[in-house]
């Protein structure tokens, strides 16, 4: 900021120096009576100003690159053309060399189109298409109105002089017209630049060209009559105008390092642009009145034609404004949808959605965010890699649901590169799914990365070819970052809940979760008159395994027993580790015989299982079972568990007695 303030102070000092110098030249011209000396003073000052413009624009040209360099090259060429015209005038007026008047005029006249081309190139770099169209119409209306004004002025005040030398008059009129066009281009550049860009250099170009346009307009009567002589305020206007062009080159060289600071108020720029149609309309109305009273018939016809064209330009400008407003409304509507999608996923970050519901939300909102026809979300699974968990709008696209399948398609490249993948032509992408070539034209995929790890992928599909512009890519990157955090949080929440609910060693429910389920089952069975069974299981001989083989092997025995119980029981049954080597099975709506049959199947399955120790396979220790039924054996958890525990110990005692009998018989 301090450097930018220094730039502003330097520009102010340059302008003050130019104004003071112009006043000094004007004062010297007024003091000197000799016409030759007055011409020499004026020509020296004009040449010095032209040299300053050449040096200033050359400095900007030397430092510019690309399209900006080409723009400043044209502006530099315009300054050289002006200097050439001025040097030719110096030779004619000071050196008394026979230089053609046409050569002098060619230098000054050529400068204006060159400056205009440079400004148009700058405007093309900065502006958007609709903004450029609107600016062209705005400025065209201004130029036509000013040409109509000049025509009306000539027809009313210089009609006799025009008739003497029409060719010289036409050349004289070209000066204000060309410099008005260059001023219009500079004004368009000031209006068309983004609000975040500094406008000091563009404003200086506008000031310089506008002063030249004013000077040539005021110079018009004397130019037509051939009566111009130095010593008028026009000298100061030309000097300050060329000095402003010189200052613009230095300002641009400094601005290119400070592109984040605006040089003028965006609101003031917008207000001035909105006021222009009204000013043009007022000028048109004034010209109509002026022409009716002062202009000749032929001049009035020409002026009326120019005025009609100006009105047509303003009407077209209004049409573009209405269309731009409609486009803006559509853009705001889409932006609202995009913000809603970002908001919903951001809200899910702090919510308690399951991973499946969250995947559905991410896929659905991604379709709205990118304005595509469908989306797919795959999540990282601990054992199975990346698995598809949601496919939004699959039937509309003609896709089958691939939920539960391994990840395929362009998302594989997103995993490899950990970056956004754009497939404008889906069929041509090496990772595309051949089955989708006739259904999908374009697609894009993004990795979902949270805390440095890829937790999933997001893929969006479009039926029609799409290029996916920078804004869509930027929004999708932001959306993917939020979605990844939401998935990581949901996964962490699910893991926290699992740890609170499940036994960490065996993966079945823990004691607290079992008691909660048991109380809920008692309440439900009491209301509906149902029965259910509670089975208590104890792994006999686990202590002997721990003592002989170690606790790690004993843990394997517990995990194997829990797995067998989960795989043998029904989906609605509950398996829980009650503590140590004891398990509890909760069998809803299960009477005596089915419960006993299920326990028999579990016991048989356990007898077939083995564990490894000392390099050999060993059968699992025997398990004892005790069964209690609600409400026959109790109406609360303690009563049911106590009954099941007593019967389990009876089974254990019975098994011990059988082993003793077998041992005694063997002896």
Image (tube, rainbow, N blue to C red):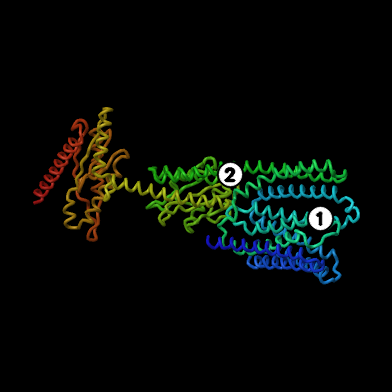
Tell me the crowding category of disc 1: few under 14, some 14 to 19, or many 20 or more residues within 10 angstroms, Cα based.
many
Count neighbours of disc 2 (C-alpha within 10 A) and say few if under 14, some if 14 to 19, many if 20 or more: few
User: Of the residues under marks 2 and 1, which one precedes in the sequence?
Assistant: 1
Q: Which mark is residue 356?
A: none
Report which quarter residue 546 is drawn in: bottom left
Question: Please, what secondary structure does the residue beneath circle 1 have?
Answer: helix
Q: Which residue is found at the position 49% from the left and 47% from the top?
A: 376
The residue depicted at 61 percent of the width and 64 percent of the height is: 253
Can residue 71 be seen?
Answer: no
Q: Position of residue 334 (x, y in %)?
A: 55, 43
Q: Which residue is mark 2?
A: 331
Task: Identify the residue at horizontal 62%, vertical 48% (top origin).
Answer: 270
* Depth check, front residue: 17 or 457: 17
* CA separation in Å, label 2 and label 1: 49 Å
Residue 220: which numbered mark, if any?
1
- Relative to 229, residue 326 above or below: above
Residue 139, visible in the rendered structure: yes
Q: Horizontal and vertical percent for residue 572?
A: 31, 38
Relative image position of residue 575 (x, y in whole percent):
27, 42
Q: Circle 2 — which element?
A: helix
Instruction: Using the image as rendered, state which of residue 274 and residue 499 is in the foreground.
Output: 274
């Amino acid at each position: 900021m301090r450097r930018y303030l220094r730039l502003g102070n330097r520009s102010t000092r340059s302008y003050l120096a130019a104004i003071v110098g112009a006043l000094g030249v004007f004062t010297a011209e007024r003091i000197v009576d000799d016409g030759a000396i007055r011409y020499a003073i004026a020509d020296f000052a004009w040449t010095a100003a032209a040299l300053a413009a050449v040096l200033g624009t050359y400095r900007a040209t030397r430092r510019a690159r690309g399209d900006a360099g080409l723009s400043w090259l044209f502006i530099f060429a315009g300054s050289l053309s002006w200097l050439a015209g001025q040097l030719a005038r110096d030779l004619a007026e000071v050196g008394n060399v026979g230089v053609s008047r046409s050569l002098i005029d060619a230098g000054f006249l050529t400068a204006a189109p060159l400056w205009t081309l440079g400004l148009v190139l700058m405007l093309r770099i900065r502006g958007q298409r609709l903004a450029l169209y609107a600016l062209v119409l705005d400025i065209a209306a201004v130029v036509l109105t000013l040409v109509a004004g000049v025509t009306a002025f000539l027809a009313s005040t210089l009609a006799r002089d025009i008739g003497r030398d029409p060719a010289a008059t036409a050349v004289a009129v070209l000066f204000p017209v060309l410099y008005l066009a260059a001023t219009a281009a500079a004004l368009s550049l000031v209006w068309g630049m983004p609000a975040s860009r500094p406008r000091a250099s563009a404003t200086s170009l506008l000031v310089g060209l506008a002063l030249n346009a004013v000077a040539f307009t005021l110079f018009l009567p004397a130019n037509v009559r051939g009566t111009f002589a130095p010593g008028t305020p026009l000298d100061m206007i030309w000097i300050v105008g060329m000095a402003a062009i010189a200052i613009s080159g230095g300002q641009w060289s400094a601005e290119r390092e400070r592109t984040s600071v605006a040089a003028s108020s965006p609101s003031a720029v917008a207000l001035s642009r909105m006021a222009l149609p009204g000013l043009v309309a007022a000028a048109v109305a004034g010209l109509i009145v002026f022409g009716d009273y002062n202009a000749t018939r032929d001049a009035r016809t020409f002026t009326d034609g120019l005025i009609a064209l100006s009105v047509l330009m303003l009407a077209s400008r209004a049409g573009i404004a209405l269309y731009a407003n409609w486009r803006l409304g559509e853009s705001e509507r889409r932006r609202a949808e995009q913000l809603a999608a970002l908001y919903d996923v951001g809200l899910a970050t702090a919510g308690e959605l399951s991973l499946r519901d969250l995947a559905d939300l991410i896929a659905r909102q991604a379709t709205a965010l990118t304005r595509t026809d469908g989306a797919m979300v795959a999540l990282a699974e601990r054992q199975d890699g990346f698995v598809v968990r949601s496919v939004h709008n699959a039937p509309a696209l003609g896709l089958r649901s691939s939920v539960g399948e391994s990840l395929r398609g362009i998302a594989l490249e997103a995993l490899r590169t950990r970056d956004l993948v754009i497939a404008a032509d889906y069929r041509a992408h090496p990772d595309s799914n051949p089955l989708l070539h006739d259904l999908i034209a374009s697609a894009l995929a993004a990795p979902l990365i949270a805390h440095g790890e890829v937790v999933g992928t997001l893929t969006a599909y479009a039926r029609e070819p799409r290029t996916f512009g920078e804004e869509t890519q930027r929004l999708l990157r932001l959306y993917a970052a939020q979605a990844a955090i939401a998935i990581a949080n949901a996964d962490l929440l699910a893991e926290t809940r699992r740890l609170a609910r499940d036994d960490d060693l065996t993966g079945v429910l823990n004691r607290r979760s079992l008691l909660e389920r048991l109380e809920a089952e008692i309440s439900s069975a009491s209301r509906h008159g149902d029965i259910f069974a509670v089975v208590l299981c104890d792994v006999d001989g686990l202590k002997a395994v721990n003592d002989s083989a170690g606790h790690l092997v004993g843990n394997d025995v517990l995990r194997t027993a829990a797995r067998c119980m989960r795989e043998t029981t029904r989906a609605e049954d509950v398996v829980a580790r009650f503590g140590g080597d004891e398990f509890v099975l909760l069998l809803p709506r299960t009477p005596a015989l089915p419960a006993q049959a299920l326990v028999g199947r579990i016991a048989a399955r356990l007898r077939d299982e083995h564990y490894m120790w000392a390099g050999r396979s060993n059968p699992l220790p025997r398990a004892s079972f005790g069964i209690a039924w609600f409400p026959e054996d109790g109406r609360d958890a303690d009563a049911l568990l106590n009954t099941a525990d007593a019967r389990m110990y009876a089974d254990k005692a019975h098994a011990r007695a059988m082993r003793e009998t077998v041992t005694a018989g063997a002896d």
